[in-house]
Image (cartoon, helix red, strand yellow):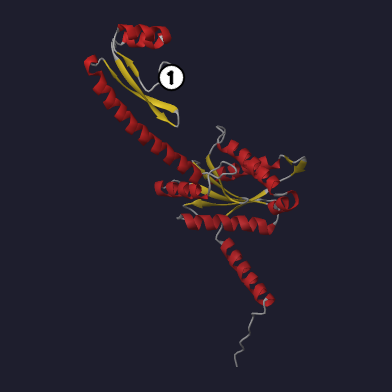
Amino acid sequence: MDTIGEKDCLIIKNQKDMEYIRKVNPLWYGILEEAGVQSVLMFPLRYECKILGFMWVTNFDTQNTVPIKETLELTSFFISSQLSSYKMVERLKHISYTDRLTGLPNRFACHEFINDLIHKGNQFAMVSIDINNFKSINNTMGIDAGNDVLIEIASRWKAIAESDNSETQDFVARLGGDEFALVIYGYDSSKKVMETVRKYESVLGKCFTVDGCDLYINASFGYAEFPDDADNRNSLLIDADTAMHEVKRANSSNHILHFTPELLKIERTLEIERKIRKALENDTFYFQLQP
């Protein structure tokens, strides 16, 4: 309120003070007069030099102005301290839940969001996303160029998530590096999940221009649904990752895959193959022949 400005408080004790208010703030004077206010003592609640609100007393005995002022001043000080602590907590919470580069929710926020949906028993899909060949961008153009790409991807996906045109509700997060997560909920059929994922895939088709260079980006999407595919967070994340890695392994034109139990068998077979190859390379493969 302009009337208070940088002063510690505002005190109106008599008609002379009310006349001053009428001159400097006619609108507020009219409100006070209409409410039958004859005396006012008001303190601002401040946080980092910003006024968050006010505390006031009206129509008090003006002979008690000093003790009332002291009481209100002390009360406003304690409330301002509590507001400052609350604001600080909110700020720290925002920092801990937000990816600094893209402004998207981070891994911790994503896990908390999934836990909340599971606790409520809501059906949803967890989509694991990995940007294809992103390492080559960092290696050839530098980390700053790679960061610009990640920021632009996040911006496009955030626009979809915040759009009112979607038939699903979406929560998009950056887990780290070139890994993202998409949580889709509020849908009435699994078909809607695939349709939504395709929206996120399609916006990558538009050219990315970084440092004067045109880049064409695509990503691998693997998803699993709660509770049909998994009934807890860890299993859901593993299943979505398994589907995503199968997309990358297949290296086909289809970049979206829904998890199926058969994928775990494929993953297990590939893991055994990797271990055998590593053992052969390190000469740690031993034969034991039975007589």
Residue 211 spot, x, y in % from top left? 75, 41
The residue sitting at the right extreme is 213
Q: Amino acid at mark 1?
A: Gly
The number of discs equals: 1
Determine which quarter of the picture holds residue 84. top left
Viewer-proximal residue among 264 and 21: 21
Write the residue at 38% across / 7% down. Answer: 22
Query: Please, what secondary structure does the residue beneath circle 1 have?
Result: loop
Residue 184 visible, this orientation: yes
Q: How crowded is the residue under tag 1: few (<14 C-alpha within 10 Å), some, or many (20+)?
A: few
Residue 197 in the image: above or below residue 42: below
Residue 111 spot, x, y in % from top left? 48, 50
Viewer-proximal residue among 19 and 178: 19
Determine which quarter of the picture holds residue 239. bottom right
Residue 27 in the image: above or below residue 245: above
Determine which quarter of the picture holds residue 14. top left
On the rendered structure, is 55 left or right of 261?
left
Residue 141 spot, x, y in % from top left? 74, 48
The residue sitting at the bottom extreme is 291
The residue sitting at the front extreme is 66
Viewer-proximal residue among 153 and 127: 153
Residue 205 in the image: above or below residue 226: above
Residue 236 spot, x, y in % from top left? 50, 55
On the rendered structure, is 178 left or right of 73?
right
Residue 61 visible, this orientation: no
Viewer-proximal residue among 288 and 83: 83
Quadrant into which the C terminus falls: bottom right
Q: Which residue is mark 1?
A: 5
